[in-house]
Image: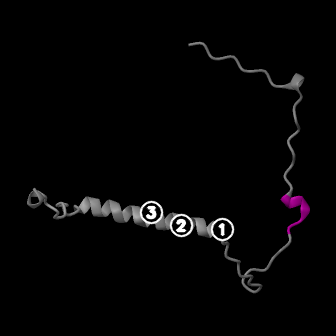
Amino acid sequence: MASDLDFSPPEVPEPTFLENLLRYGLFLGAMFQLICVLAIILPVPKSHEVEAEPCEPRSVEVTRKPKAVALSASKRPKKEAKKKR
């Protein structure tokens, strides 16, 4: 009875080209995600070059946009009627 048992490893087929492509594609995707997360967690300080780009302070009038006047509930424009066909 002991001689009837087969302890050899099971036969595993070679991975196909598409299985290898999927495997390495998922690996590269995981590496890309880790790099993106690390870029968010560990920001790289920007180098300040004074000669390359001179800073010109903008005037207050240029940067501010005119504020839209808030319409009250009684002065809302009426809805247009739909065209009849």
Marks 3 and 1, how far apart at CA: 19 Å
Which residue is depicted at the point 87% across and 25% down? 73
Q: What amino acid is at disc 1?
A: Ile
Q: What amino acid is at disc 3?
A: Gly
**Which secondary structure, mark 2?**
helix
Horizontal relation, residue 6 to residue 55: left or right: left
**Which secondary structure, mark 1?**
helix
Query: What residue would you read off at disc 3?
Result: 29
Front-lying residue, 49 or 5 = 5
- Where is residue 36? Give x, y as percent: 56, 66
Magenta stretch?
58-63
Query: What residue would you read off at disc 1?
Result: 41
Q: Nearer the N terminus, badge 3 or badge 2?
A: 3
Query: What residue would you read off at disc 2?
Result: 34
27, above or below 64, in the image: below
Which residue is depicted at the point 78% across and 21% down? 78
Horizontal relation, residue 62 to residue 82: left or right: right
Horizontal relation, residue 63 to residue 7: left or right: right
Whether residue 29 appears in magenta in the rendering, the answer is no
